Image (spheres, rainbow, N blue to C red):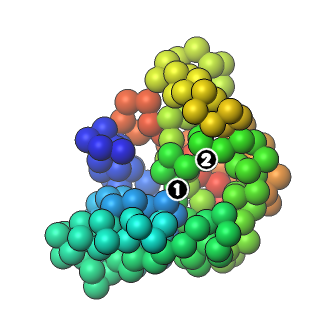
C-alpha cells in the first residue's frame, strides 16, 4: 500500500474504535504495516499477520523493526484453502477488489464463520461511492482489476452491504479514510 496506505492506516487507527476488541487478524497482511500501526495505538491488543508463506520473512523483519514481535504473531497460509485465523476483528486490505463477486461473497462467509459472536470484518479498499461519480481512483482501479483478472472489480458500499448480509453479517458501516481509501465494516453481532 506504500506511503498512501500508511497515511490511511494511521487515520484508521485514530478514527475506528479498536477498543471494542482485543484480538485482530490482518488477512493478507503483507509486511505487517496495519498491525504495527494499530499496535502502536492500542497496547493491549494482540495480532496475527496472515499471508502466504513467502511473505512471512518480510513481515517478521518489519515487525521486529518496530519491536512488536511479542504482540504480532506471523502465520502463513492461503485464505482460499486454509482456515481464516480466529480473532475478534478480521481485516483485509485490497483483497476483495481482486476477486469476482462469487469469490468475494465466499471469502466474506469464510470470515463470518471464523469470527466469534460480536466480531467484525473490515475491508480497507478504494470503495466507490454509491452513485459511482466521485471516487475516480476507485473507478479506475476497478477497470484495472477487470483488465488484470477478467472478472474482478472494486465496489460500492451498497455492494459490500449486500454481500455482508448474504454472508450472515447483521450491520455495516463505512469509515472514510485518506484520499480514495475507506474501510467497509461488517458486524457479526
| Quadrant of the image containing the N terminus | top left
Q: How many numbered tags mark residues here?
A: 2
The residue drawn where x is 59% and y is 41% is 97
List x then y, in percent, for residue 124.
49, 47
Which x, y percent locates residue 28? 49, 60
Seen in the picture, residue 21 relative to 181 is either above or below; the reply is: below
Residue 109 seen from this side: yes
Query: 169 or 125, which is in the foreground?
Result: 125
Residue 96: assigned label: 2
Between residue 154 and residue 81, name the one nearer to us. 81
Residue at image x 54%, y 27%? 144
Q: Are marks 2 and 1 in contact (CB under 8 Å)?
A: yes
- Which residue is drawn at the image coordinates 71% and 34% (left, top)? 151
Q: Position of residue 109 (x, y in %)?
A: 75, 61
Asked whether residue 165 appears in the rendered view, the answer is no
Q: Secondary structure beneath disc 1?
A: strand
Residue 160: % across, % down: 68, 42
Local secondary structure at mark 2: helix
Which residue has dot 1 on it? Answer: 92
Q: Is residue 1 left or right of residue 92?
A: left
Answer above or below: position of 65 versus 127: below
Q: Quadrant of residue 121?
A: bottom right
Q: Is residue 152 left or right of residue 50?
A: right
Task: Work out which quarter of the rendered image holds the C terminus and state it.
Answer: bottom right
Amino acid at each position: 500500500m506504500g506511503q498512501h496506505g500508511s497515511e490511511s492506516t494511521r487515520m484508521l487507527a485514530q478514527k475506528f474504535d479498536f477498543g471494542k476488541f482485543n484480538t485482530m487478524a490482518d488477512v493478507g497482511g503483507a509486511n505487517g504495516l496495519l498491525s504495527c500501526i494499530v499496535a502502536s495505538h492500542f497496547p493491549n491488543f494482540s495480532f496475527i499477520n496472515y499471508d502466504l508463506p513467502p511473505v512471512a520473512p518480510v513481515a517478521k523483519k518489519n515487525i521486529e523493526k518496530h519491536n512488536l514481535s511479542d504482540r504480532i504473531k506471523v502465520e502463513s497460509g492461503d485464505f482460499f484453502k486454509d482456515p481464516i485465523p480466529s480473532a475478534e476483528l478480521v481485516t483485509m486490505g485490497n483483497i476483495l477488489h481482486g476477486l469476482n463477486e462469487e469469490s468475494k461473497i465466499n471469502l466474506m462467509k469464510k470470515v463470518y464463520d471464523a469470527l466469534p459472536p460480536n466480531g467484525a470484518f473490515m475491508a480497507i479498499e478504494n470503495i466507490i461511492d454509491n452513485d459511482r461519480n466521485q471516487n475516480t481512483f476507485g473507478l479506475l482501479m476497478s477497470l484495472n482489476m477487470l483488465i488484470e483478472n477478467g472478472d474482478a472489480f472494486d465496489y460500492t458500499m451498497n455492494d459490500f452491504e449486500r454481500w455482508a448480509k448474504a454472508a450472515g453479517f447483521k450491520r455495516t458501516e463505512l469509515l472514510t479514510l485518506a484520499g480514495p481509501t475507506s474501510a467497509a465494516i461488517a458486524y457479526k453481532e
